[in-house]
Image (spheres, rainbow, N blue to C red):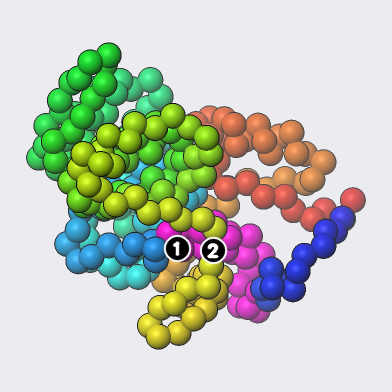
Amino acid sequence: PFFIAHKSQLHAVPDGLSDEQAVLVDPLAGALHGVLRRPPAPGERVLVLGGGIIGIAVVASIRALECSCPITAVVRHAHQEALIRARGADTVLRWPRGLTQAHRYDRIADQVGGRRVSALFGNQMLLGGFDLVYDCIGTGRSLTDAMKFTRPRGTVVEMGTSQISVVDTTPLWFSEITLRGSYGRQMERTGGTVRHTYQHVFEMLQTGRLRTDGLLTHTFALREYRAAFHALAHRSAGSAVKVAFRHSGD
C-alpha cells in the first residue's frame, strides 16, 4: 500500500493533468531525455527502432521540440503504426516477427538509397545509412542493427536497457559512429535554464505539444495483475501499449 521515497523523487502533478496523463509522464520523460541527449539537426534523416511506448514517445518528443527532419520508424504491429504516424513519423516500416535479416536490411537500404552486403555466416552489412538512429528496443540485436543502419560518422542513441548482450561492434570502429547512452530522466539544461525532465513533460502536456491519447490502452485492478502481464505479453492480440493499475479501494 505504500513505499518510501526521497523527496527529490517526488513531483507534484499540475492540477490540469488527469491521472491518465500523469501515469504516462515517466515514459514520456525517458523518451524526451534521450532526444535531448542528441536532438536531430535540421534535415537529418532519423530512424526510430521500436513501436512501443518509448519509440512512440521519441517521435512525439522530436516533433514537440519542433525538429525539422524526416523520421522513419520501424514497428511490429498495426496499432503501433497508427499511433506512431499520428505522432509525426513520415515513413513506417512494419517488421512482423520472423522477418529475415536480409529482408530487414534490404528495407533499410531502400529507405536511404544504400545497398546490403552479405558476409560470412549470414551476417549482413549496409552501405549508406541514417544520420541518427534511436534504438528503442534494447536488445543486443537491435543495438547491432542500429549501428549498422547508421551512416559513417553518424550517431546512435541507445534508449533501451539492453543489459548484458552480444553485440557486433564492427560499425562502432569501422564507420566511426558515435554511440550515446540514455537512461531515465535527468536535470536538463536547455535554453539557459535547468529543469527536471518531468517539468518539461508537464509543460508540453499542458500546452498540447505532447499528447497521451491512445497510449494508456489498458487498466486493471491490482488483483488482476496476471491479466495485466498477459496483456503486455500478447500485444498483437490486445493492442496493448501502456498498461496501468487503478486504485479500486479493495
Question: What is the three-letter code of the residue carrying label 1?
Answer: Leu
Helix, strand or loop at mark 1? helix
- Residue 185, disc: 2
Left or right relative to 188: residue 243? right
The residue closer to the viewer here, 126 or 106, is 126
Q: Residue furthest bottom?
A: 192
Q: Say how many tags the image has.
A: 2
* Percent x, y of residue 92: 29, 43
Q: Residue at x 11, y 32 (%)?
A: 115
Residue 184 image point, x, y percent: 54, 58
Viewer-closest of 227 and 171: 171
The part of the chain drawn in magenta is: 13-34
Q: In the image, residue 91 lies at what x, y percent?
A: 24, 46
Helix, strand or loop status at disc 2: loop
Do the residues bearing badges 1 and 2 touch, measured as CB atoms within 8 Å? yes
Return the residue at label 1.
Answer: 32
Mark 1 crowdedness (10 Å alpha carbons): few <14, some 14-19, many ≥20? many
Say which of 200 and 115 sits in front. 115
Report the quarter where the N terminus lies: bottom right
**Residue 234, can we see it?**
yes
Reply yes or no: does residue 131 show up in magenta. Answer: no
Amino acid type, mark 2: Arg
User: Whole-Å distance between the Cαs marked 1 and 2?
Assistant: 8 Å
Q: Which one is earlier in the sequence, the residue at label 1 or at label 2?
A: 1
Q: Residues within 10 Å of mark 2 (few under 14, many from 20)?
A: some
